[in-house]
Amino acid sequence: MTATSPLFRPYTAKQPNPWPELAADRARCPVAHNTELDAVQVTSYAGVKEALRNHAAFSSTYSNLWPLDAPLPEYKQVLGAADPPRHTRQRKLLVRALSASRVATMRPFSETLANQLVDDILAAGPRFDLITDYARKISEAHVAELLGIPDEDRPSFAHMATLIDRHTDALVDEGLRYDGPVLGLWRRCLAPAQVQDIDVAETSKLFVAVAAANHDPVQFDDPDTFRLDRHDASTHLTFGAGIHLCVGMNLARLELTTAVATLYRRLPDLHLTAGGTEQVPGPLIRSWRHIDMEYDRTPFHPATN
Ligand code: HEM
């Protein structure tokens, strides 16, 4: 372990723009103990990927959300908080329900929903909260829809997956790489292990900084620039890696694609208001409680898909 201390301090000094300090940590000490986190912090792309793939040493049962001191009780060891073989059985049940072809059948629902929410936003006036009036409603309604429709009632629209607008795809993946909702994930080391040839002591907590990995210049050219012409944006680690790779990523991509496309098509002059934004605290999530937006009523396009 290097003697250099990481600068990242998400509990006491959470930055609106964490990239410079994460970049400094990645350059000086990509695998190093962070005193504030009381954990080994991993910030390089190669290190993050290696750590996430080593589920044998780095357990999720101490929670991937909180740095707990003891494993969760067994009944709480579910999916993202479970190790094999329990995790393997649980995940099998979900993979089919959230497959690309199943999620493609939700596309008409997704587009109608986004348009209805924009109708409501337009009816309410030129200001709205992107989080509470749009993003949260979209995510809740998709889960409700997924749970509510029995298998046999779902038409087969697998071919619709191919109709997804390629430009919006590029926007969504570059958005997830450049500034995704996950800063990092927690693991607990349960056997002597290494990350990038650096020893990680048994019982260490591990903080795997996926957001730092997504800006690693070894993996992405010009990483701090938002670019729609990247061929490799989708190699970002915002959905994790290894056995816990986000099982909902097809649905997340559908939601993001329709949400972004509908918003920008119907409210093309959308902009942030001057008001401040408040971040969700803690090291795990990069997200805001509210994002106040404003649009000009006149130039919007009607709801046609
Ligand atoms: C942009 C949106 C999303 C992001 C960035 C995201 C990110 C992630 C990440 C990083 C993991 C890995 C956790 C770990 O390794 O500890 C994960 C796992 C998971 N995600 Fe997502 N997720 C998103 C949306 C969704 C949605 C919409 C669903 C459900 C429909 C979902 C369900 C899950 C489940 C069940 C797991 C656990 C999988 C496992 O442990 O095998 N996610 N997600």
Image (tube, rainbow, N blue to C red):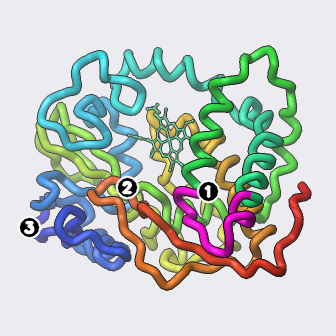
Question: Which residue corresponds to mark 2?
Answer: 285
**Position of 279 relative to 299 (above/below):** above
The stretch drawn in magenta includes residue 123? yes
Q: Position of residue 96 (x, y in %)?
A: 65, 23
Secondary structure under tag 1 reads: helix
Question: Which residue corresponds to mark 3?
Answer: 3
* Disc nearest the viewer among 2 and 3: 2
N-terminal label among 3 and 1: 3
Q: Position of residue 44 (x, y in %)?
A: 35, 62
Nearest the viewer among 17 and 82 is: 17
* Disc nearest the viewer among 2 and 1: 1
**Residue contact between numbered discs 2 and 3, judged by CB atoms under 8 Å:** no
Q: Which residue is drawn at the image coordinates 62% and 32% (left, top)?
A: 144
**Amino acid on which disc 1 is placed:** Tyr
Segment colored magenta: 120-134
> Is the residue marked by circle 1 packed among few (<14), some (14-19), or many (20+) residues within 10 Å?
some
On the rendered image, what quadrant is the C terminus found in?
A: bottom right
Nearest the viewer among 294 and 21 is: 294
Gap in Å between the C-alphas at discs 2 and 1? 19 Å
| Name of the residue lying farthest toward the front | 124
N-terminal label among 2 and 1: 1
**Position of 234 relative to 124 (above/below):** above
Gap in Å between the C-alphas at discs 3 and 1? 45 Å
